[in-house]
Amino acid sequence: MIILSVGLAMDAVAVAMVRGAKGEHSVFRAIETGAVFGAAQGFMPLIGWGAGVVISDAIAAIDHWIAFALLSFLGAKMLVDAARDGKDDTPGTARSHYTGLIIAAVATSIDAAAAGITLPLLGPSIWIACLIIGLVTAMLCIPAYWLGTRASGNMGKVAEIIGGIVLIALGAGILIEHVLA
């Protein structure tokens, strides 16, 4: 379960690092990022499990489109923010900060929802599995955000551009994988 949790957390870790590079350099922001990403990663398998029980065929038909749309939107937003010099965390834009954080958390946890369909087959109860996935994600995202703050300065804009491209590529890869399957 730990290995699965680490695997599911990797895209959230990458986004947390980019957010750290372009965001506020504070312990609070690192913990906030870890908590939101961990909560999303921990909650989404429960949604996947429930959806799998009720409407697995409908979810399977569109999950890749949802992931593609969310990741592409987030990636495009990061590219636009980088072009604007990434000033979206200035005073007065707290709503933008939280909106971006929640969109990033949901976008990076789509795979956890898909994994939720199969979690009961792995042994632990769905509740224990969700708790482990959420905690592992949070514990990896907090230091990732902090590492991102250390790479900031001139690297923040570069990290944001790279992060945007990576998210768009990740979304396109998910879409291509499912369309060709």
Image (spheres, helix red, strand yellow):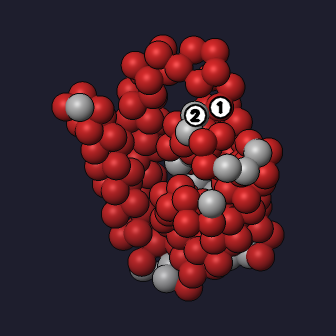
Name the residue: 56% across, 39% down: 118
Q: Examine the rendered structure and indicate whether residue 24 appears above or below residue 112.
A: below
Q: Which mark is residue 49?
A: 1
* Residue that carries the numbered disc 2 in the rendered image: 117
- The residue at 53%/48% (across/down) is 108
Quarter in which the N terminus is drawn = bottom right
Q: Nearer the viewer, residue 121 or 21?
A: 121
The residue sitting at the left extreme is: 180
Residue 3 in percent (x, y) is at: 55, 66
* Residue 54 visible (yes or no): yes
Up/down of 18 relative to 92, above or below: below
Q: Could you classify mark 2 by the number of other residues whose Cα lies within 10 Å: few (under 14), some (14-19), or many (20 or more)?
A: many
Q: Residues within 10 Å of mark 1 (few under 14, many from 20)?
A: many
Residue occupying image coordinates x 29% and y 49%: 169
Residue 142 lies in what quarter of the image? bottom right
Badge 1 marks a residue whose secondary structure is: helix
Nearest the viewer among 47 and 98 is 47
Sequence-first tag of 1 and 2: 1
Residue 113: give x, y in percent of width and height. Answer: 58, 37
**Marks 1 and 2, how far apart in space?**
4 Å
The amino acid at mark 1 is Trp
Point 38% across, 27% down: residue? 65
Q: Which mark is residue 89?
A: none
Q: Tell me, yes or no, whether the two marked residues, 1 and 2, touch with CB atoms within 8 Å.
A: yes
Residue 95 visible in the picture: no
Quick one: 43 or 49, which is closer to the camera?
Answer: 49
